[in-house]
Every structure is written in structure tokens, then in C-alpha cells.
Amino acid sequence: MGANPVISPFTLEGKHVRLEPLRADHAVALWEIAKDDLGDLFQWIPYQLETLSHFEQFNRQVLEEQQRGLTVPFATVDRASGQIVGTTRYMNMDLGNRKVEIGSTWIALPWQRTAINTEAKYLMLRHAFEVWRCLRVELKTDALNQRSRNAILRLGAKEEGTLRKHMLTWNKRQRDSVYFSILDTEWPTVKSNLEKMMGA
């Protein structure tokens, strides 16, 4: 299979959330909403996000990956206020085999347990299955992160298994990762359930 096409940045918009192309200058706004809750937000993130410099470096890295066709990153925006509330992205893209991963997602504490994350996942899944015609969308999380595992299952994803010692985190912890997926054949049911959850 050839390399992924480099996909031009695009926006996904719903009732509550707008996913707009991540830019380098978003790092400051993201730092501002996260800096008081770094421990809660990034306990399970494998890369280091402890300073504004880390946020700037991470944005640069992600945007470089986008230029290579590996990722499509977004800033997550609360439509009601226009406030940036977090980030998410398509990553580990393999469009030749019609699969992508949705991940690298975090939402600042004041906007957690709102409609934003569910709607963001819905918009990204819909685009993956209905525009890119993916056969498979993957999600993964740290095996120790039970809250994330439960949230992924609530979306309608199926747990596939655990990759043991899958990666080293920034502080050298050996992380096991739990993989989940949604298939194109499962998407109609998942879509209907998500729309019911959102009251659509």
C-alpha cells in the first residue's frame, strides 16, 4: 500500500462542539485551560505535558505528523462559548487499509461529563465511516485507566484485547494498552445509539 494522502485540514461541527484544525498557536489556549489540573488530565497520557513548552512542542510534533499524512488533529471548541476546551485527533492513519484511530483526546475539567465528548466522537466516527469509508476505527487507552475504558465501551466499541508492555510513557513506566474497535458493519447501530444518547 502507498502512503496515506495528506488530508487538508477540515472542520467538523455539531450542535454543541466544533472540531477545528489544530494550529501551533492553540498551544497557549490549551495550556491555560489545563495548567491547574495537569495531574487529573494527563495521568494516563504517555507523553509529557507539564509546561507551556511541552504543549508547544507537542503541537509542533502533531502538525509535522499531519504533513506526513499520519494524523488529522483538532482543537475542540465549545460552540456555546467559543472556548477551546481540549483536543482530539485521527491518528495512526492507514487509509490504504481503510482504518484510522481516534485518540489523543482530552477535555478540560469544566467541560467533562457534558455532551461535548460524545458529540465529538460521533462527528469523527461519522466522518471516518461515511466520508473516508473506513472498515475499522480503533481506540485505545492505558490498561489502568478504567474510566476511559468504560467511556469507550459506552460509545459502542468492542474491546479486542490488551497489548502488554505496549509502550514506555515519558517517565519510563511500561504501559499496557487496551484496544477497542468499531467496524463499518457495526456503525449503523452505534450511530443510532449515539444519536439517542445525544437526544438527536
Image (cartoon, rainbow, N blue to C red):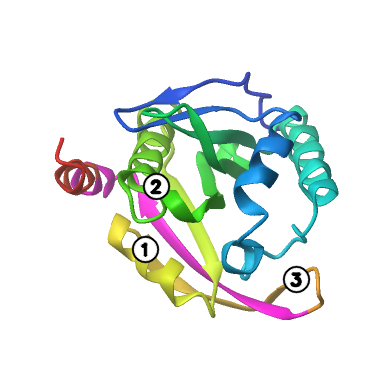
In the rendered image, residue 177, in percent from the top left (x then y), is placed at 58, 72
- The x, y position of residue 195, in whole percent, is 19, 40
Q: Verify CB contact (< 8 Å) between mark 2 and mark 1.
A: yes
Amino acid, disc 2: Asn
Which mark, residue 117?
2
Kindly identify the residue that appears in the image at 52 percent across and 62 percent down.
140
Specify few, some or many for label 2: CA neighbours under 10 Å numbering under 14, 14-19, or 20 or more: many
Q: Earlier in the sequence, mark 2 or mark 1?
A: 2
Can you tell which quarter of the image residue 80 is in?
A: top left
Where residue 17 appears, as percent x and y from the top left, is 39, 32
Residue 175: say if magenta: yes
Kindly report the distance in space between the C-alpha atoms of the residues bearing marks 2 and 1: 10 Å
**What whole-number distance in Å separates the C-alpha atoms at marks 3 and 2?**
24 Å
Residue placed under numbered mark 3 in the picture: 169
Q: Is residue 126 above or below residue 181?
A: above
User: Which quadrant: the C terminus?
Assistant: top left
- Which image quadrant is residue 2 in? top right
Q: Which residue is mark 1?
A: 151
| CA–CA distance in space, label 1 to label 3 | 22 Å
Question: Pointer 1: residues within 10 angstroms few (<14), some, or many (20+)?
Answer: few
Residue drawn at x 43%, y 35% as measured from the top left: 128
In this picture, which residue range is highlighted in magenta?
Answer: 173-190
Q: Is residue 12 above or below residue 120?
A: above
